[in-house]
Amino acid sequence: MSSPNVLYSTLLTVSATVSAVVAIFAWRRRSVPSARAIAWLMCGLCWWAATYALHWTAVYRPGPHFWVDLTYAGVVVVPTSFFVFALRFTHRDQWLTTPARYWLLVEPLLTLLLLWTDPWHGLFFAGKRLPDTSTILNGGPWFWTHIVYTYTLLLIACLLLGRFVLRKTTLFRGQATLILAAALLPWLGNVIGLTALNPLPNLDLTPIFFTLTGILLAGSLLHYRLFDLLPVARSQLFESMQAGVIVLDVQNRVVDINPAALRFLALSTAGAATAVSAATVGQPGAALLAPWDVQLPAGTQPEAQSQLVVVNGRMHLDLRVAPLTDNAGQLSGRLITLHDITDRTQLEQALRRQNEELEAFAHTVAHDLKGPLGVLLGYTEVLPDFLPADTVPSESAGIVSKIQQMGYKMNTIIDELLLLTEIQQQAVSRQSVDMAAVLAEVMPRIEPLIAARQAVIDTPASWPAVWGYAPWLEEVWTNLLDNALKYGGDPPRITLGADVQPDGMVRFFVRDNGPGIAPEAQALLFTEFTRLGQVRTAGHGLGLSIIKRIITRLDGRVGVSSTPGRGSTFYFCLPPAPPDGVAGL
């Protein structure tokens, strides 16, 4: 084998080896679409360079062009793969529809078929192939069709890449230079190979220059993280973020991690430098987050999650796992963010303690007032018997009645304050509740108000059973009906009912024919000490807040729907009673 042949085969063997290494490296990142295209590009180049090297070794050559013809199995892959890479990298995935992908396979397959069967039809070489050269500079109709097709794809790919990188800011300068150089190298190789500038006579330089393209893309992969889910701007923003960020691929392996996340992890491992460092890239995310007992989504589950993580019993982190999707909407990874919420948590805990102290104080005050108030109301019952004989009966009766009314109102407020504070503290045993029996206990309590308002109340023939606590639900119905009677129409017409919601919860509602509630007021209805209205009836605003606390304790929810002028519907939802009806907390 002559010296030039040794040189040529050596260069091509090196090119094939480098292409294989880059292909493997890119394939390991195939969850990123552009990496998959680069892997196919480098596989094509590896085959091209390897078979071309065998042509120059002359170890086994059944025919003068046997190995050159085989190179085309890789040649036809290169322009198509490079074109697909350009589309993926420039975020034009919508061009790669299923029909478009099949059309991209037509020309390469047809070229191979016509090339390998050329002796029968002459459409590719047309008898213009020289027996003593490995390069093909002229041919038949399909040869030129293939040339035009190949250069058209390469030209479009280069234009797309050039347009894409020129629109980027200075943050992308290094990456833009590498990508533009990678795109232009094959053109440079063609110019050199087709002119007197070629230092290697008869050698097609295209696979070598395309291999250099692969090396530059690999350089982007290593240095600029070309295929990562994060942009080049990470060095400006990602590294300086106060929030911790961890990027995972679809297999929940760590793709990237910023210093803040490393700092949080180091605190969880007693500052062990070997436990958490930049070397965590590539490790399973579950192993990295093991100190926090974080459960990552399995498989391709796309749902977002939020968890509270406590570090060393002091630092509180809000950990969120959100899906990352590509332009086609497919899951391409996950983003974990870590926010230090220690200050907020401490404030919330302090506020919770203050609320507990206030509730305890309110309970104590209400309890201490109830005894003296009961004595006061008792005296008002016997007060008329001790009035002087010359007192005007009508005046004395009016004064005593007013004192009694205010006393009973104060007693109601005290009872509700006691109930409001006891709801949070009292442990109850939930069981299946017969709502008809509950309402049977409620109606006598509001009968005087029903008669005074001449109200009409419609109730269903039957009620669904729910999981709750009957004494508390009596208070819920009492407060809802009391509000409907006070704020309903004149006279009030009230409809009670129940239905099953899509989530399986049972909704109970009270619908009135009152003036309705403005949208801006509806959000305040279930807040302590907020009244339904300032015009119709004065109140102390505890009833609806009691309802909310009770239903929340029973794992339900409350709400209201109202349109001004068309009445209001207050409702609460509770879980249905389980089939066995076994009591539980």
Image: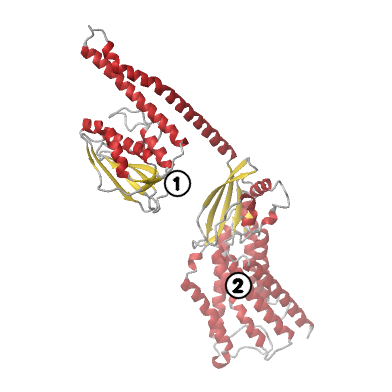
The three-letter code of the residue at mark 1 reads Gly
Circle 1 SS class: loop
Residue 323 at x, y percent in the picture: 53, 56
Asked which quadrant contains residue 284, the reply is bottom right
Whether the residues at callouts 2 and 1 have beta carbons within 8 Å, the answer is no
Residue drawn at (58%, 41%) of the image:
341
Q: Is residue 194 visible?
A: no
Viewer can see residue 392: yes
Q: Which mark is residue 40?
A: 2
Residue for point 61% across, 46% down: 241
- Residue 55 in the figure: left or right of residue 183: right
In-image side of 531 versus 154 (left or right): left
Determine which quarter of the picture holds residue 83.
Answer: bottom right
Is residue 484 depicted above or below 378 in this figure? Answer: below
Residue 33: % across, % down: 56, 65
**Residue under pointer 1:** 584
x, y percent for residue 446: 27, 33
Query: Residue 469 placed where, x, y %?
Result: 39, 42
Please tell me whether residue 72 is drawn above or below residue 294 in the rendered image.
below
Q: Secondary structure at mark 2?
A: helix
Q: Nearer the viewer, residue 369 or 234?
A: 369
